[in-house]
Amino acid sequence: MLFGIELCCYCVVSSIMIDLRLVDLGARVSCILFVGFPRFVEGEGLTGMDSDTVRYVASFDPELLQLPELSHLALKERPKMAEELYFQWLSLPETGKLVKSLIEDVKSGSPLNAAGSSSTSNAATNSSLPSMFPAGSAPPLSPRSTSGSPRFMKRSSGAGPSPFGSPLKLVSEPVKEVIPQFYFQNGRPPPKAMKDQCLSRIDYLFFGNMDGLQIQEFKTVTKEICKLPSFLSSSLFRKIDVECTGMVTRDAFIVYWVNGNMMTKDIATQIFTILKQADRKYLTQEDFKPVLRELLATHPGLEFLQGTPEFQERYAETVIYRIFYYMNRSGNGQLTLRELKHGDLIAAMQHAEEEEDINKVLRYFSYEHFYVIYCKFWELDTDHDFLIDKENLIRYGNHALTYRIVERIFSQVPRKFKSKADGKMGYEDFVYFILAEEDKSAEPSLEYWFKCIDLDGNGILTANEMQFFYEEQLHRMECMAQEPVLFEDILCQMIDMIGPENESYFTLHDLKGGKLSGNIFNILFNLNKFMAFETRDPFLIRQERENPTLTEWDRFAHREYIRLSMEEDGEDASNGSGDIWDESLEAPF
């Protein structure tokens, strides 16, 4: 190798074949020269070469002819064009002189010179190659060093011309595409313009408050800068005011919100980060209590509860239980960021922030929904110890449920009771039950009742398991003098309703894929809803079509609230007659 040129020579019969590999900053031209033949092309040839000197016979690689105007792919697709360019290069006078000089050096056995100078000058250079043809010896292989070999030398845009004097322009290697950073452990840093705009707004809101803002004044910052619901203000305030000074300064807010890259996170991540404890990666029910306290204190639709702290607490608990029922699908009481993003809590919070009538926020925050749940619990809890046993629950819905399904609920198969009293259901357990019972179209409800019917816990509902629960339904129909429906007939109907992958059993996946899945459970253990489904009340069907966005729970809660409020109005009217009764035995409203 000399100045980026490797010359390998072979003796072939009476001629000398030279495989001339030109390595010039990544460009390589491979040509085979045969010595001892007539001229290169009759009438044409390398300038200055004798007819018996050299003839061009073979080949080149179009990819190695790197031109600035043409890519190697274009040369490969048009080999004739590349061949013409190569012949044009060979026909140049300086090319002929160079090749002739190299051939003469080969014939004489003298060291080669890449620049085409005389053999005397070649011997003088310290980078010359030894003779290529010592008798009986093989040339040593050059070491594959990344520092000395031109094959590994980084191409530079300022590289000089080719040592062969080729007029072909060199092309720099394509610039490697730099993939920008796409993951930031602590959040993506804000763009400069966004950061400057935020800082300007912060300066405006903190102007004249060098000592910082108090918790009531901080709500403006929460709404205008953070774009979060105002009832998250106290949680955000305490997150920044770690030393509990009662003040949040401008610099402290900038450190947390701007320098902490909170402003570039999505709203779900922002709320999750604000509410969770520093040493946890999930939210618990306790983390939501400050939010509900703030909502109760500030929302105009809940002002009427200000004088009844006991019911404020019950309302907050009910909202939190509903949140975890629908969103904490693992059921472990630890709400993850993934679950928060997949749910609709953030949208419900924003709706509650904008809507003055809290009852229009049907998801989680409706007071009417809380009223129905609490009154239903109060009706069943006859001794008002805030606990329900089996005999209490069997009266639910005018004795709609069978004993066998109540037994399964109290065996805590679908969900472990949070109540510490043995064999009794607490208020939180009842909230889960009533949501599952009155909205069997929701996935949490399907999972709840699937576990109840799956007696052996193998993940499938067989005909025998379903028949076990339907037998009591059949007996109840006979006692009520109704025409009984045999299980074989009802099983065919259920298969038609669900369309399972395997007709010999139902899976949870089968149930989640059908719109009538909830009716399967009504058939098995809720006689009232089973009969209502069989009669197909046209009025109810029209209501469902008029309000397709309402869930079964929304419709149930609306009907029950009207009924309960009418009963309460009747009690209030009778109260005006002067009769005296024990208020502790009545519903709390």
Image (cartoon, helix red, strand yellow):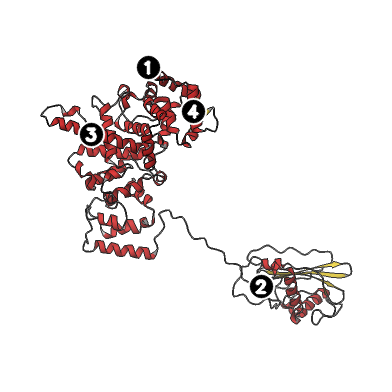
Q: Residues within 10 Å of mark 3 (few under 14, many from 20)?
A: few
Alpha carbon separation for disc pair 4 and 2: 76 Å
CB atoms at circles 3 and 2 under 8 Å apart? no
Answer left or right for 112 relative to 410.
right
Alpha carbon separation for disc pair 2 and 1: 96 Å
Front-lying residue, 256 or 103: 256
Alpha carbon separation for disc pair 4 and 1: 23 Å
Front-lying residue, 207 or 111: 207
Q: Position of residue 410 (x, y in %)?
A: 36, 25
Task: Name the residue beneath numbered marker 3.
Answer: 566
User: Does label 4 or label 1 sit earlier along the sequence?
Assistant: 1
Disc 3 element: helix
Q: Residues within 10 Å of mark 2 (few under 14, many from 20)?
A: some
Front-lying residue, 369 or 182: 369
Task: Name the residue beneath numbered marker 4.
Answer: 493
Q: Position of residue 296 (x, y in %)?
A: 24, 44
Task: Name the residue beneath numbered marker 2.
Answer: 67
Amino acid type indicated by mark 3: Met
Task: Name the residue beneath numbered marker 1.
Answer: 479
Disc 2 element: loop
The single residue placed furthest to the right in the displayed view is 14
CB atoms at circles 3 and 1 under 8 Å apart? no
Q: Residues within 10 Å of mark 1 (few under 14, many from 20)?
A: few
Number of the label disc, if any, that sits on residue 316: none
